[in-house]
């Protein structure tokens, strides 16, 4: 467990409230790709590293602190573990005696990562807070889960999802791969045989839908834990990620069921009740392919490149919006080729079953 008490202060605070003992500004190093070695990070040089490192002893003395100025758009790591990301330049204090007890070592390494590279060395000083400084104000302790174990729990969730996939593939390879049939998505001319295949939902397909719910729940729990400004940060950030994943899994199952009910009711109103399951499977197939690709990309980042996850989530949000628009168009042209219905009625039908639920969901989550 690493429990850090960090406090945001102004850039000039250390001059008045911080008694400097040692200046570490010249101690920053970086890994040189060409030389394959750690080198000092020098200013006014051609080196523009994206990651810089600072190692320091922790046995400085009781109540000693490391003060560091973290440049904007930078991620902070302690001993290789992700701590936080800072959009603007921020000054942080680290309690060194607390770190020594909790890390179990008398030395630690601090890493700053900025994909746009560093041009100047950040300030880094060791010293003591002035006695008149009230350190109990605005202190934000970071819990064990947020720093040390959050990524480990998410790796367990990823492993469970992949194990579920492997089990389904071993038992029902044909039915599972039917949900990953990309050719079926882009085929607009369908025979009656293709449509009649989905007159009813089979038990195996229900099991695959349960797998898809676990997949979507995994993406949501990753987003709630790593997106800098999540829609509902409080509740899920306070939970163990596995508990949060199970809760989201239940919610997604309910939403998928409600989606099928909505499709059934609206289809009966438009007189195309025989297309209900065909539409539902097409809807799920597109989601399965798209979100599986996203899940694989995020899984790789969590396992190998944790600092990439927040940036990927920003891209994923845009991709989800684009995906829903593309899915709407694909469904429109697919139905237009196979259903005798006016274009305006078909557009209204798809708006009711596709766009309206999305708008209701956004209104519910975004205040």
Image (cartoon, rainbow, N blue to C red):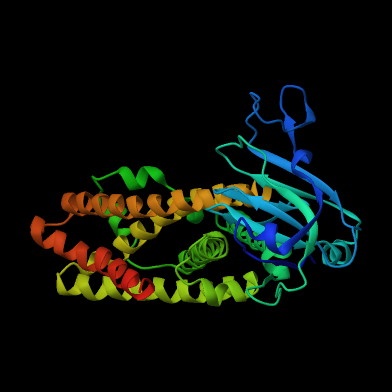
Classify the position of the C terminus by image quarter.
bottom left
- Residue 139: quadrant of the picture: bottom right
Residue 297: percent from left, percent from top: 55, 47
Instruction: Work out whether residue 152 can be spotted.
Output: no
Residue 185: percent from left, percent from top: 34, 47
Measuring 31% from the left and 43% from the top, which residue is drawn there? 186
Instruction: Work out whether residue 211 can be spotted.
Output: yes
Report the front residue among 267 and 248: 248
Report the front residue among 280 and 83: 83
Report the front residue among 8 and 165: 8
Measuring 29% from the left and 49% from the top, which residue is drawn there? 326
Report the front residue among 335 and 326: 326
Classify the position of the N terminus by image quarter.
bottom right
Q: How many marks?
A: 0
Is 248 situated above or below 332? Answer: below
Measuring 10% from the left and 55% from the top, which residue is drawn there? 343
- Residue 42: quadrant of the picture: top right
Residue 253: percent from left, percent from top: 46, 73
Is 197 situated above or below 118? Answer: below
Is 41 situated above or below 254? Answer: above
Residue 50: percent from left, percent from top: 63, 37
- In the image, taking residue 95 as reference, residue 310 lies left or right, namely left
């Amino acid at each position: 467990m690493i429990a850090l008490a960090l406090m945001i202060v102004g850039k000039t605070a250390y001059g008045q409230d911080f008694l400097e003992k040692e200046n570490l500004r010249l101690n920053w190093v970086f890994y040189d790709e060409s030389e394959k070695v750690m080198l000092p990070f020098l200013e006014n040089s051609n080196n523009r590293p994206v990651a810089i490192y600072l190692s320091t002893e922790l046995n400085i003395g009781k109540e000693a602190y490391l003060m560091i100025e973290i440049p904007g758009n930078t991620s902070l790591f302690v001993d290789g573990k992700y701590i936080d990301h800072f959009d603007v330049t921020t000054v942080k204090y680290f309690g060194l005696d607390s770190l020594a007890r909790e890390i179990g070592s008398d030395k630690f390494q601090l890493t700053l990562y900025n994909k746009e590279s560093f041009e100047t060395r950040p300030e880094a000083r060791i010293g003591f807070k002035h006695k008149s400084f009230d350190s109990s104000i605005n202190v934000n302790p970071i819990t064990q889960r947020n720093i040390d174990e959050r990524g480990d729990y998410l790796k367990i969730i990823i492993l469970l999802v992949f194990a579920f996939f492997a089990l389904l593939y071993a038992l029902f390879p044909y039915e599972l791969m039917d949900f990953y049939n990309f050719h079926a998505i882009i085929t607009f001319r369908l025979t009656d045989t293709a449509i009649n295949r989905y007159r009813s939902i089979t038990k195996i397909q229900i099991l695959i839908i349960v797998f898809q719910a676990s997949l979507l729940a995994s993406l949501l729990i990753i987003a709630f834990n790593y997106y800098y400004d999540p829609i509902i940060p409080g509740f899920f950030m306070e939970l163990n990620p596995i508990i949060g994943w199970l809760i989201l899994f239940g919610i997604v199952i309910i939403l998928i069921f409600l989606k099928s009910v909505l499709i059934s009711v609206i289809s009966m109103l438009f007189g195309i009740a025989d297309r209900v399951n065909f539409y539902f499977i097409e809807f799920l197939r597109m989601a399965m392919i798209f979100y599986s690709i996203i899940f694989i990309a995020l899984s790789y980042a969590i396992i190998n490149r944790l600092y990439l996850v927040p940036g990927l989530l920003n891209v994923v949000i845009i991709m989800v919006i684009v995906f829903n628009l593309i899915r709407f168009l694909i469904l429109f042209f697919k139905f237009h080729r196979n259903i005798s219905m006016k274009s305006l009625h078909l557009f209204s039908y798809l708006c009711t079953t596709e766009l309206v639920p999305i708008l209701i969901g956004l209104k519910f989550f975004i205040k």
